[in-house]
Image: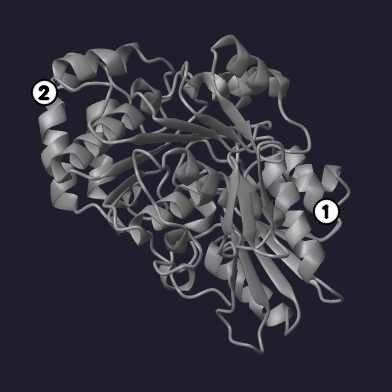
């Protein structure tokens, strides 16, 4: 399963240094905006989407709703699975490589004077493409944290924080309060904001909103979603809601956030209730809570997710609890060494009968097979094997598992992209 070459990613890395280079701060972005004669206030409405998990699906729900209402939408997300062009969708399609090259060339002269990072260069080029193609709305996903993330250099018309949990502690802080403070950094005084944690709202997010005089609307308090009847309600009115496109209670929450954002921006971007009551432009989000049947109905089901932190693993465990029944579950896992490996694997121990550990080979940040194996054994897992490649892990699982069994593949974008692209781009089972 050879991975695709990506000249665009190489070009951005050449301009910035390694893709793994992470340097927090907005000073470079502000200097670059000035040099490029770009304003932080874009001519179209801007939505910033941050949070620990759920950003990607919230973005695609927003994208679908606005496209269904007839708007031309720019959606900037990260990281990409296979090709760098996936990071920007213009009207539902990846921006052409030629447009990326054009904007990167124009940004390059500025980069020589300002040491921008990989993500900063990508963000500048993506926003310039949105400006050049005159999108009606720009949806920008936060790359890391929020307060010091490159997309936060732009002024939002609505900010969304999906959830707050432990991840990226080396950059964001060691506890949930510190991380919540960073996530809430995308709030602006007087600008509508949404927050999706219902059971345990992070105090630092709520405090940040009060301090900055942000009109924060919270899922479960100010707006609600009723999965049983397919209804969304909030801000004095209600509407029919389509079902989420992926399984799990968290997807209802992400859908509710998107519907709330559409409601809050009605004056700037009018959307009829009919445009959000059903799916007419089905968004795709490969590798997120994705159930597949690549071996047909007589083979095991494949569950694919890029989950790489404890909260996302708990959500996966809930999916397995709902589906597993009496069958077996094997897991193929590969992770980055700077993640909470034990905290991510632990929620799944009860549901996984055998583990296949892989070592990611396309980044120096990868955890070794030995590290993954020892962590699993330290947690009490007994059936742990190391595989030389994704092909080997899939073949061993396919020949061992049968109808009614599950193969779970998770742990990182770097791992999931090793699966055949055709599988992840097919219709869900």
Quick one: quadrant of the N terminus?
bottom left
CB atoms at circles 2 and 1 under 8 Å apart? no
In the figure, is residue 71 to the left or right of 35? right
* Viewer-closest of 96 and 255: 255
For the question of whether residue 173 can be seen, the reply is no
* Image height of 361 relative to 425, above or below: above
Residue 349 tag number: 1
For the question of whether residue 141 can be seen, the reply is yes
The residue that mark 2 highlights is 109
Residue at the (31%, 42%) spot, across then down:
137
**Residue 75 drawn at (x, y percent):** 35, 46
Q: Give the Cα distance between marks 2 and 1.
A: 51 Å
Residue at the (37%, 28%) spot, across then down:
151
* Image height of 215 relative to 333, above or below: above
Q: Residue 378's image quarter?
A: top right
Residue at the (26%, 44%) spot, across then down:
136
């Amino acid at each position: 399963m050879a991975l695709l070459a990506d000249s665009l990613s190489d070009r951005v890395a050449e301009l910035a240094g390694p893709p793994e280079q992470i340097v927090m701060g907005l000073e470079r972005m502000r200097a670059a905006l000035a040099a490029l004669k770009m304003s932080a206030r874009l001519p179209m409405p801007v939505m910033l989407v941050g949070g620990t998990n759920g950003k990607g699906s919230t973005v695609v729900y927003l994208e679908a709703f606005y496209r269904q209402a007839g708007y031309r939408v720019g959606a900037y997300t990260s990281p990409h699975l296979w090709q760098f062009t996936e990071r920007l969708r213009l009207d539902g399609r990846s921006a052409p490589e030629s447009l990326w090259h054009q904007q990167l060339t124009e940004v390059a002269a500025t980069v020589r004077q300002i040491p921008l990072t990989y993500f900063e260069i990508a963000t500048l080029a993506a926003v310039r493409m949105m400006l050049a193609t005159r999108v009606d709305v720009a949806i920008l996903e936060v790359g890391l944290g929020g307060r010091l993330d490159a997309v936060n250099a732009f002024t939002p018309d609505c900010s969304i924080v999906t959830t707050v949990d432990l991840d990226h502690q080396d950059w964001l802080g060691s506890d949930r309060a510190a991380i919540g403070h960073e996530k809430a950094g995308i709030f602006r005084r007087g600008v509508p904001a949404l927050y999706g944690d219902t059971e345990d709202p992070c105090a630092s997010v709520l405090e940040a909103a009060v301090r900055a005089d942000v009109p924060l609307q919270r899922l479960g308090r100010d707006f609600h979603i009723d999965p049983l009847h397919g209804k969304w309600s909030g801000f004095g009115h209600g509407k029919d809601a389509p079902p989420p496109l992926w399984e799990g209670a968290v997807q209802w929450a992400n859908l509710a956030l998107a519907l709330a954002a559409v409601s809050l921006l009605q004056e700037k971007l009018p959307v009829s209730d009919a445009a959000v009551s059903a799916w007419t432009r089905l968004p795709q989000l490969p590798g997120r809570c994705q159930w597949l049947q690549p071996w047909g109905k007589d083979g095991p089901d494949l569950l694919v997710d890029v989950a790489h932190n404890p909260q996302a693993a708990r959500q996966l465990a809930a999916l397995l609890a709902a589906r597993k029944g009496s069958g077996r579950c094997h897991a193929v896992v590969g992770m980055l060494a700077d993640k909470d490996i034990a905290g991510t694997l632990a929620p799944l121990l009860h549901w996984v009968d055998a583990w296949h550990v892989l070592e990611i080979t396309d980044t120096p940040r990868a955890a070794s097979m030995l590290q993954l194996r020892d962590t699993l054994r330290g947690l009490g897992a007994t059936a742990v094997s190391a595989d030389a490649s994704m092909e080997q892990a899939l073949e061993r699982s396919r020949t061992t598992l049968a109808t009614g069994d599950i193969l779970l593949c998770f742990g990182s974008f770097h791992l999931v992209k090793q699966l055949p692209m055709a599988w992840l781009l097919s219709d869900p089972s």
